[in-house]
Image: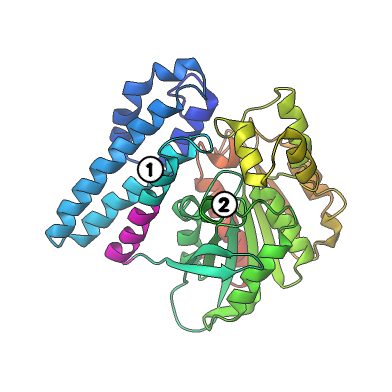
Amino acid sequence: MALFEYFPNYIWNLSISIAMESGAQLGEIIDMCQPIRDAANSGADAGTPQFMKAWAAMGDKLLELAGEDEAKGRYFSASNKLERASLYLITAERMQGHGAPGREATYVKARTAFDRSTALGQINRERVEIPLETGTMPALFTRAPGDGRKPVVVFCNGLDSCKELLYWSRLPEQLARRGISTLCVDQPGSGEALRLQGLPVDPHSESWASKAVDWLEQQPEVDPKAIGMTGISLGGHFAPRAVAYEPRFASGAVWGANHNWREVQDKRMSREGENPVPHYWAHVHWAFGASDQEDFLTKSQAMNLNGHMDSIKVPFLVTHGGDDRQISVSYADDLYDQLVNSPRREKVIFTAREGGVEHVGADNMAYGRDLISDWFAETLGGHAR
């Protein structure tokens, strides 16, 4: 496999690989991981307090170094360090079980660092709040350069990501290069919406995606006829579902197909496939607002796209890693085959020839990032050169 396999378990290696793809420095990765290598031998769940301690310590050191830069007026250098501090703190927090000591404080510290980095670095991302029927959907708006109305893509989370990780995927950067803006959202069940507002997953993603479209239509720099949607990992359920039932979307794509996630849960109960995070069942109970396993299985029943995809009547791109250890590549086939009313459907399975073979390209996100950016440039009216 192409994943960076420093530890003896998949979940820890996945977190490292995501961090590396999100802007981590290799030397800092080694400094954080060497002291906890033995802890990983106890399993993905048991050693997570040591993981958090090591990664949070690096985050704290970078916060201190950033403060020194800021005091000298070196704002761009401070921003660079704050970016990595936020990344390492978010990675540390993401690896903990719900309610773990220090988890909430670590998340708040990461968010504060991220916002400070945005300001000091003059980074093209504005924090916005999308009104929902209950609460709000925090988001990051990255604007395409130039005057006039521009196409835009709504980019949603998977099960355990956050809008900051979406931004660090560099998809917003590549879309902006092609003349397309991006709205990275913490939809219900993810990021701030879950952690700070307690909003659980809504399998009927059109309910919150439509609110994002409402907000975008009010922005003077947005072309309301050129709004697309994509999602990563479990976003491979949310994005197709939203495009199927929100007719204002003009194009769609998935970075990893998740055609029948409810079926995946049955497989995981039989210990088939890899989990994305430690303390997996506790995490999904929290994300879905479930009291126990039976309640979770009931609330996740609608996480199944069978019977819905014929409602998609716009161009749609399906991508998947050929060696995905979490979600079977067969789900990409199911999704593609059911896009019978799409005027342009494409399916790309990443192979060892180019890379990106792991779940959502955690081994190499470059190919998924480029392909999805080009797709929206072609289908929403951007440019690829």
Element under label 1? helix
Q: Is residue 73 above or below residue 145?
A: above
- Mark 2 vs 1, N-terminal side: 1
- Kindly identify the residue that appears in the image at 51 percent across and 84 percent down: 148
Q: Eyeballing the image, is 158 above or below 48?
A: below
Camera-side residue of 187 and 135:
135
- When asked about the image quadrant of residue 247, the answer is bottom right
The amino acid at mark 1 is: Leu
Which secondary structure is most common in the magenta stretch?
Answer: helix
Kindly identify which residue carries mark 2: 194
Q: Position of residue 281 (x, y in %)?
A: 64, 32
Horizontal placement of 186 versus 236: left or right?
left
Question: Residues in magenta?
Answer: 111-122
Amino acid type at circle 2 is: Leu
Could you classify mark 2 by the number of other residues whose Cα lies within 10 Å: few (under 14), some (14-19), or many (20 or more)? many
Q: Is residue 85 left or right of residue 372?
A: left
What mark, if any, has residue 89 been given in the picture? 1
Please identify, in this view, whether the residue under mark 2 or under mark 1 is nearer the observer: 2
Q: Is residue 252 left or right of residue 99?
A: right
Where residue 245 appears, x then y in whole percent?
A: 78, 64
Please report the residue visible at 61 percent of the width from the left and 63 percent of the height from the top. 376
The N terminus: image quadrant: top right
